[in-house]
Amino acid sequence: VRSLMYGIGDDPNPLQESVELLDDLVTEYIVDMCHEAAKMASHARRNTIKVDDFKFALGGIRRNGSVEELLLMSKVIADARKQFN
């Protein structure tokens, strides 16, 4: 979390309380998104969660565009790593 904070412009050595707060907030957000995605899968009568469930849980065109971009970049990075192995 400390590196994430620095990467988005915070101090290289943020207060421990700030790191803990952000860690709690991010963890809570991820857990909530997982629960929402599980609800979407349940509504579709599936026991497994798919990427589309997360896209729907995130909602909004702007956020979904970001999700699409992150998924694409993840694939690009994975493909690049395969070339070096």
Image (tube, grey):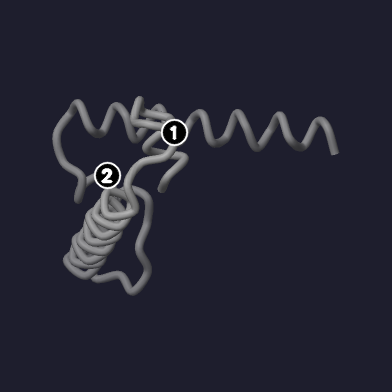
SS under mark 1: loop
On the rendered structure, is 31 left or right of 14?
left
Residue at (27% x, 54% y) in the render: 17
Q: CA distance from mark 1 to mark 2?
A: 32 Å
Residue labelled with disc 1: 12
Residue farthest toward the right in the current orientation of the protein: 85
Q: Quadrant of residue 49?
A: bottom left
User: Exactly how many numbered labels are in the figure?
Assistant: 2
Locate residue 21, reporting x and y percent: 24, 55
Q: Are marks 1 and 2 in contact (CB under 8 Å)?
A: no
SS under mark 2: helix
On the rendered structure, is 85 left or right of 71?
right
Residue type indicated by callout 1: Pro
Numbered badge on residue 55 = 2
On the rendered structure, is 42 left or right of 2?
left
On the rendered structure, is 39 left or right of 82?
left
Task: Let me know if residue 53 appears in the view.
Answer: no
Q: Quadrant of residue 64?
A: top left
- Whether 53 is drawn above or below 74: the answer is below
- Whether 51 is drawn above or below 74: the answer is below
